[in-house]
Image (cartoon, rainbow, N blue to C red):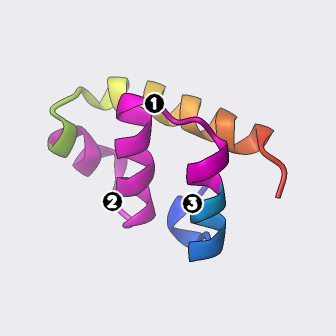
Amino acid sequence: MIISDFTNIELDYLRHNCNFVNNEKDLFELRGQGLSLEEIAEVLNLSVDGVKKVSRKVNKKISRVHF
């Protein structure tokens, strides 16, 4: 799932309805800016594996929300 491909309206909808917490919010915003998982790991001071785990949670929440 490429979050940076969503429109601003879709991003706002997801922000409001996905109930992102802590690192999920940060990851969602950084992915929306087009950063790679490796870049996000550096920004958030997490391992790449940790970012992948958070990314899976974010993707799962997005897939559960209906547009």
Tell me the crowding category of disc 2: few under 14, some 14 to 19, or many 20 or more residues within 10 angstroms, Cα based.
Answer: some
- Give the tally of numbered discs: 3
For the magenta stretch, what is the residue range? 14-42
* Outermost right residue: 66
Q: Position of residue 39 (x, y in %)?
A: 23, 50
* Residue type at numbered disc 1: Val
Magenta-span inclusion, residue 38:
yes
Magenta-span inclusion, residue 30:
yes
Q: Position of residue 12 (x, y in %)?
A: 58, 63
Q: Nearer the viewer, residue 37 or 20?
A: 20
Check disc 1 and report the residue beneath it.
Answer: 21
Q: Position of residue 58 (x, y in %)?
A: 56, 37
The answer to whether residue 42 is visible is yes
32 is higher (above) or lower (below) than 57 = below
Q: Secondary structure at mark 3?
A: loop
* Residue type at numbered disc 3: Ile
Check disc 3 and report the residue beneath it.
Answer: 2
Q: Main secondary structure of the magenta part?
A: helix
Name the image quarter holding residue 24: top left
As drawn, the label of residue 35 is: 2
